[in-house]
Image (spheres, rainbow, N blue to C red):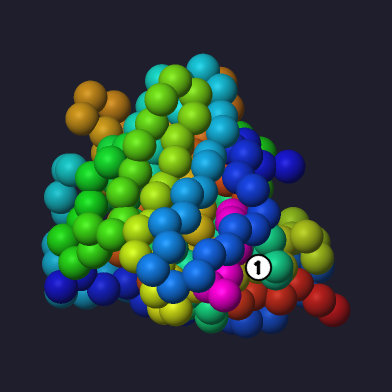
Amino acid sequence: QLQLQESGPGLVKPSETLSLTCTVSDASITSSNYYWGWVRQSPGKGLEWIGSISYSGTTYYNPSLKSRVTLFVDTSKSQFSLNLNSVTAADTAVYYCARHFSGRTTWYSGWFDPWGQGTLVTVSS
Amino acid sequence: QSVLTQPPSASGTPGQRVTISCSGSSSNIGSNNVYWYQQLPGMAPKLLIYRNNQRPSGVPDRFSGSKSGTSASLAISGLRSEDEADYYCAAWDDSLSAVGFGGGTKLTVL
């Protein structure tokens, strides 16, 4: 069954770029029925959608983060990646990747399944 | 401040039925499907309910979802100790052009 695994540095300095990769295994990343998304959870707080990308590279970003976020996809490696630039302490969070299902008639939904185990990224000098 | 509003906590004793509410607006719950997630301590969220009231395979039928107008609810019947977790609702928000999550409800099994 589909599995996702995040990877990347656990510590990033303020003002630098946070870069994470999600590797998809045991399923194809190239289906047109869903997107591949990133969601973060700040310590002790709730969930925040960062953005999602299709296998063909179509991207959708949370407007609150759009100016700092870029998503990439590499279908040959079954991977998709997140870059978040100009980070501050407020970007310290557990970052999850997840399969993001499309709606019946729209690209979007609140449907994420499954999720990766998550990776903690701390922004600190 | 979360897009969707949930009570911060809920509790019940084993065997009881507990309901968790999720309040939104016409731009999210009022016009889009609602999803529910369970997050066990130290774990990633897990899909519990999709499209308002559908259960993925493997989710016990003790869990049920409903939606009316701009509000949704998650009901857990026959409460068990392993249900102790954080529960989140989610829906697309047309005004924000983003997925909105509730702030989460911590369920305690007494």
Question: Does residue B8 show up?
Answer: yes
The structure residue drawn at horizontal position 15% and vertical position 73%, both measured from the top left corner, is A1
Residue hosting label 1: A93
Local packing at callout 1 (Cα closer than 10 Å; few below 14, some 14-19, many 20+) is: many
Q: What residue type is disc 1 on?
A: Ala
Residue A35: % across, % down: 30, 47
A72 in relation to B1, above or below: below
Residue B3, compared with residue B107, is above or below; it is: above
- Quarter of the image that includes the C terminus of chain A: bottom right
Prevailing secondary structure of the magenta residues: strand
Side of B76 relative to B40 (left or right) = left
Residue B72 lies in magenta, yes or no? no
| Residue occupying the point 64% across, 75% down | A121
Image vertical order of residue A66 relative to residue A70, above or below: above
In the rendered image, residue A94, in percent from the top left (x then y), is placed at 59, 70
Give me the residue at 66% from left, 42% from top.
Answer: B2
Q: Which residues are magenta?
A: B104-110
